Structure formats: C-alpha cells, structure tokens
Image (cartoon, grey):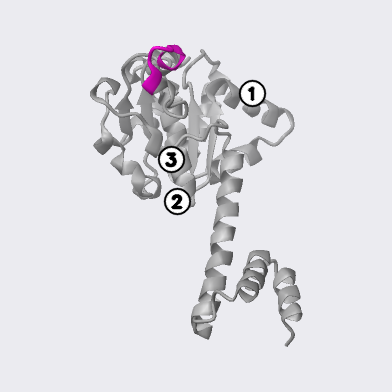
Amino acid sequence: MHIQSVLDQLRALRMATMAEALTAHIRDGNSRDLSHEEFVALLVEEEFNARQNRKLSRMISRAGFKPEQASMENVIMNPTRGFQKRDLAAFATDAWIVATQNIVLTGPTGCGKTYLAEAIGYRACILGYPAIKIRYPRLFEEVHAAKGTGAYLRYLNKLAKTKVLIIDDFLMQPIEIADANALLEIIEEKDQTGSLILTTQFPIDKWHQRLPDPTLADAICDRIVHGAIKLHLDGESMRKEQRNPRQSDRGKEKTTLS
C-alpha cells in the first residue's frame, strides 16, 4: 500500500498525530534501527500522549481555574504557613478522590487557600478526574438560573458527574433557606459521586452561624466535615508579600500561593 494511502486512512480515523509522526520518521530516517513492533509502538505512544494532552487541556479549560496555572510544585511551604510538605502528600495520588473524601481549607484572606485548592484540582485533572471551581456566590446564581429555565436537575447531574467540585469562599455571604436546601442537595450528590474542596475564611466551628436553619446546618456540616482532610493556612497575606518590592525573592514567585 502506498504511504499516502496509509496517511489518509490515519487522518480519516482521527489519528492525525500518528500520521504526522509517521511522516516525520520516514522523512528523517531516525527509526531505521527499530523493529516493526518497536516502530508501531512508538507511533501509538505519540498518538496516545497527544490525546491525553488534549484531554487534559479540555479539562483544565472547563475547570475555571485562573490563567496563571496553580501547581503543587509551586506551593510555598514553611512553618509559618501552617502546613508542611507531608501534609500535601495525600494529593499526589487519587486515593482521596476514589474514597470521595472532602478537603476543607480554612484561613484568613490572602493566605493562599484558592491557589492551593486549584493546585489540588489541577493535580486531579492530571490524574484523569474532571474538576470545576466555582465561587460560593456564583454557585447560587447558577442554581437560580437553572431553576428558572427548568434545567435544575440537569445542573445537579452536571455537578454530580464532576469528580472534584471546588467551592471557593464557602459561606462568604448569608443565604436563604431555599439556597441552603439546594446546597444540601449538591453536597448529598457529591457525597456519593466525588469530592468537594472548600476554601473559607470561617473556622468549622463557626459554620452553623452562617447558615439559616440549624437542622440544615447540621446536615450540611456533617456531610462536608465527616472524614474530610482539613488544613488551616496561616501567615501574612501572599498578595501583600507579592506587592512588597523589598521582598524580591518572593516577588519572583508570582505563580505561587495567591
């Protein structure tokens, strides 16, 4: 069979990367010492890696992370932050996702909760699990919009299918009982299908005061906190440190906790 026919068939099968790799290897002659099996394995690996990279790009795009991509490698760890490297070891694998374990990140504003949440979410995407980040006020805007268009159940299903749901600035504002009921429904769905990552300025023992009904508060808090991984972040605001020109070393680390 003529090589052009093979290339056309690969592209028809949506294996464009394999077609390009085959063209390049034939042109450059850099695979002459490979056996047929090794050559085919090389082409398959290039196609597979390209597809995995495209899948990761799509997941990150849908996740709603900040443009300056957070990563575990850039997280600043020292005693004043309130956690150490060993505290993040649990997020290197997917064990916490498989176990549908939640993560609660507490601490004052600017201490890096959102960055750490996004870094953990990005790691989940690398491991093949879709993630979505949404701010607490925005969550209820979307709930109201979905109810208004009759798409509420579909919206709940979307959140349920998302293995890692990040709610940023949890309990930032008071909510009505109807919204608390919706929040409980979302949390109940995630309790069976995936994990929650919450960032909040409020210590866990203050959560009840931020919710409109004691019974709902009990149900919401119990489902989130039971068995969750809890990290409290301390230290000066990372935004303040990055704005301080005298802190030149930390000023260079613009992609770290923010």
Q: CA distance from mark 1 to mark 3?
A: 22 Å
Q: Earlier in the sequence, mark 1 or mark 3?
A: 1
Foreground: 176 or 245?
A: 245
Q: Which residue is mark 3?
A: 195
Q: Which residue is mark 1?
A: 141
Residue 194 visible to the viewer? no
Coordinates of residue 42 in the picture (x, y in percent): 52, 72
**Disc 3 marks which amino acid?**
Ser
Q: Quadrant of the N terminus?
A: bottom right
Q: CA distance from mark 1 to mark 2?
A: 30 Å
**Disc 1 marks which amino acid?**
Glu
Find numbered disc 2 in the image and state the secondary structure of the residue it sits on.
Answer: loop
Coordinates of residue 34 in the picture (x, y in percent): 49, 81
Q: Nearer the viewer, mark 1 or mark 2?
A: 2
Coordinates of residue 253 in the picture (x, y in percent): 42, 27
Find numbered disc 1 in the image and state the secondary structure of the residue it sits on.
Answer: helix
Q: CA distance from mark 2 to mark 3?
A: 14 Å
**Disc 2 marks which amino acid?**
Leu
Residue 168 left/right relative to 97:
right
Label 2: how many Cα within 10 Å (few below 14, some 14–19, many 20+): few
Q: Earlier in the sequence, mark 2 or mark 3?
A: 2
Q: Earlier in the sequence, mark 1 or mark 2?
A: 2
In the image, the segment drawn in magenta is 241-249
* C-beta proximity under 8 Å, tags 2 and 3: no
Find numbered disc 3 in the image and state the secondary structure of the residue it sits on.
Answer: strand
